[in-house]
Image (cartoon, grey):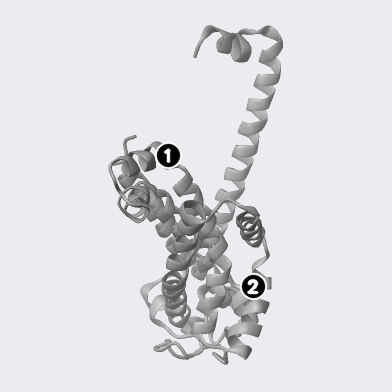
Amino acid sequence: MNQSNIDLYTTKPRGRVPNFLFMAFCFLATMTCVLMLLVLIWNIIVQGKGWLSWDFLERLPSRFPHKAGIKTALYGSIWLIGLTALFSVPLGVGAAVYLEEYAPKNRWRKLIQLNISNLAGVPSIVYGILGLGLFVRALAFDRSILSGALTLTLVVLPIIILASQEALRSVPDSIRRSAYALGATRWQTVWYQVLPASLPGIMTGVILALSRALGEAAPLIVVGAMAYVPFVPEKLSDEFTSLPIQIFNWTARPQEDFHHLAAAGILVLLVLLVSMNAIAVFVRHKYGKRIRW
């Protein structure tokens, strides 16, 4: 930092007070959010720790709290996330590569880009209504796990596209020009240079988008996910439930024991979400260190 910057931000008396007040406000806002989060998590742990066990993970749903488990919801969420990743990752990354590396920069590209950005902010229940009309009724997939996964694909697809585009833009143009100067084609440049360099950012965006899909309940309720499913899904046409829907069902019941079950279910969901986010951080840290421009 040169001397002019030091004077501007730290040493001028007239700038010290606003700088200190702004820093104090940001610190207070951060601590408030962290404190609220810790209180919420502690409350959930207190309510659910006595009900969280291996049997809780292995038992089927029941109308008796002491016999109820989360097995079908856990398997349903795993099915949904696996299928959603299978559908959304190739489509999202492929669309991002086309828009950033191949599409001409004209008004149609701007229009498509604007629509993708707007779709990323659409409430997820709107995608549920679209999934109900398109997958459940028009394509006759019925209220199956396939309809649920395709609906979640619609929810996360704009997020994956935008995250992948940002990762591709972070690759310096000098990498592309150097590849072209050595005689590489555009496909070779994208496949061997641009994609490997942007892979940490793309994978981080994909994992965070799938983490959001794991916690979604509204679109699944609209497409017909059921609160009580007494079997583990084995094929794409099976009915299904998921962790957020099972938790919502337990919290809506008047008996207090079901509220403890819901807290235990939230702990399971939190473990899955934190694990996925930890994988994203690990991937970014591990593969980001290999990139030197």
Give the vertical position of 115 relative to 140 (above or below): above
Query: Residue, x 65% and y 80% (percent of image)?
Result: 222
Would residue 146 be found to the left or right of residue 107 on screen? Answer: left
Tell me the amino acid under the disc marked 1.
Asp
Dividing the picture into quadrants, the one containing residue 71 is: bottom left
**Gap between marks 1 and 2, in whole Å?**
36 Å
Residue 162 position in % (x across, y down) = 54, 54
Given contact means CB atoms under 8 Å apart, are the residues at marks 1 and 2 in contact? no
Give the vertical position of 160 relative to 31 (above or below): below
Residue 82 position in % (x across, y down) = 41, 73
Q: Quadrant of the C terminus?
A: top left
Residue 5 position in % (x across, y down) = 57, 13
From the image, tell me which residue sits under label 1: 173
The kind of secondary structure element at disc 2 is helix
Tag 2 or tag 1, which sits nearer the N-term? 2
Would residue 182 be found to the left or right of residue 13 on screen? Answer: left
Query: Residue, x 48% and y 58% (percent of image)?
Result: 98
Query: Residue, x 67% and y 26% (percent of image)?
Result: 22
The mark total stands at 2
From the image, tell me which residue sits under label 2: 127
